[in-house]
Structures are given as C-alpha cells and as structure tokens.
Amino acid sequence: MSNQNDWLLLTGGDEWDISFYVLDIKTKDIVYKKTKQKELSSLPPEKGRPLFRPFGITTDDKFIYLASNDRIGMFNKSTFGFVKLLDIPAFINTHQIIKHDNFLFICHTAINCIGIHDLETKTNKFIKMPATSTIAPSTSSTCRCRRASVRKYAITLGRATRTMRGCTGNPG
C-alpha cells in the first residue's frame, strides 16, 4: 500500500456498512475499505439517526479516530485494526473531530457545543456555541452559523488549520 502521506480517509455510512475508506490521492483508487465496526453502533433507541453513522475522522502518528453518533472509535493506523472505544463523552449526531497533541476536539451538534477532551488527563471541557455565530473558516471570508454545525469552519491549532464540514450556513 502507498505511503500514509498519500492517503485521504473518507467515512463510510450506514447504507454502505463501511466504517471508512482509504483513498490513494496519487492513483485516485480506494486502496482499503474498513467494514462496519459493530462497536461504533449506538445503542437503541435510535433518536432520529441511524445507529451506525460514521461521520468525523482524524488521525495522529499511530491512530485513526472515527466518530459515529455517540461513539468515538480508535483504529491502528498501520493495520486499520480496531483498538477500542474512547471513554469520553459523546452525543448522538456527533460531527467532525480533530486530534491535536493529547486533545480531541469534537463538534457535538446535539448539544450545540465544541468538546475539548484531554486524552492524557481524562478531563473534558465544553464550549457552548451561540444559536447563531460567526466563525472564521480557513479563508479570509466568514461563515454565518446556526448551532455548532456549520457548512465550513476552522479550528486553528498552532500553525495547523483544518476545515470541518457540517454547517447550515453559507460562506460569505
């Protein structure tokens, strides 16, 4: 398989029974499909969302982290094998996630906040988002947002800026 720097990870979905795909960006081929990981399925009741709904995905040097509703799974980045569910608060309809140092930043749209989860100290902080707010995306324009889910917005961490998807606003 190609170099990990040449990968793009894509989440699957409930209708495909795929946790994530690995796309080789040089060849534009899907080089791996991780089938449905049963541990990522929420427990009933459904709460208006499919029980298996992989959505947010991020990585660090060793692991892939995948959000599926109220579950955050950890996978080995070299073998794609499932490692464990993370013991952090997550909620139905969890959207994007970003890993930076020992922190996992999670867009918790069900409770309209951004969760900051320290994986080393096991502490959790939640930043409540206003009902409508303006958050600067990675470009110079801004995006009007409703709830914590916005079509585009960015969290800037040091020098790295990554764009997160899932908004109801329009850039402008």
Image (cartoon, helix red, strand yellow):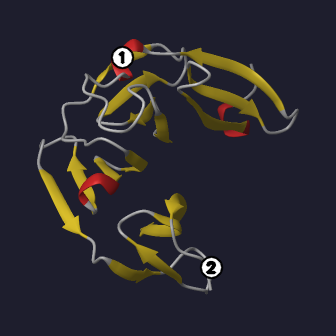
The residue indicated by pointer 2 is: 139
Amino acid at pointer 1: Val
Label 2: how many Cα within 10 Å (few below 14, some 14–19, many 20+): few
Look at 34% across and 56% down and name the residue there. Answer: 109
Residue 62, percent from left and from top: 45, 29
Q: Which residue is mark 1?
A: 83
Residue type indicated by callout 2: Thr
Q: Secondary structure at mark 2?
A: loop
Secondary-structure class at tag 1: strand
Note whether residue 145 is visible.
Answer: yes
Asked whether, in this view, residue 103 is left or right of residue 36, the answer is left
Residue sitting at x 43%, y 34% = 66
Q: Where 164 falls versus 152 (above or below)? A: above
Q: Quadrant of residue 29?
A: top right
Residue 31 placement: quadrant: top right
Q: Position of residue 86 (x, y in %)?
A: 25, 30
Task: Locate the C terminus and report the quarter of the image it occupies.
Answer: bottom right
Q: Is residue 165 left or right of residue 131?
A: right
Q: Estimate the x, y position of residue 35 in percent, counting from the top left.
A: 56, 14
Residue 89 vertical position relative to residue 19 in the rendered view, above or below: below
Q: Earlier in the sequence, mark 2 or mark 1?
A: 1
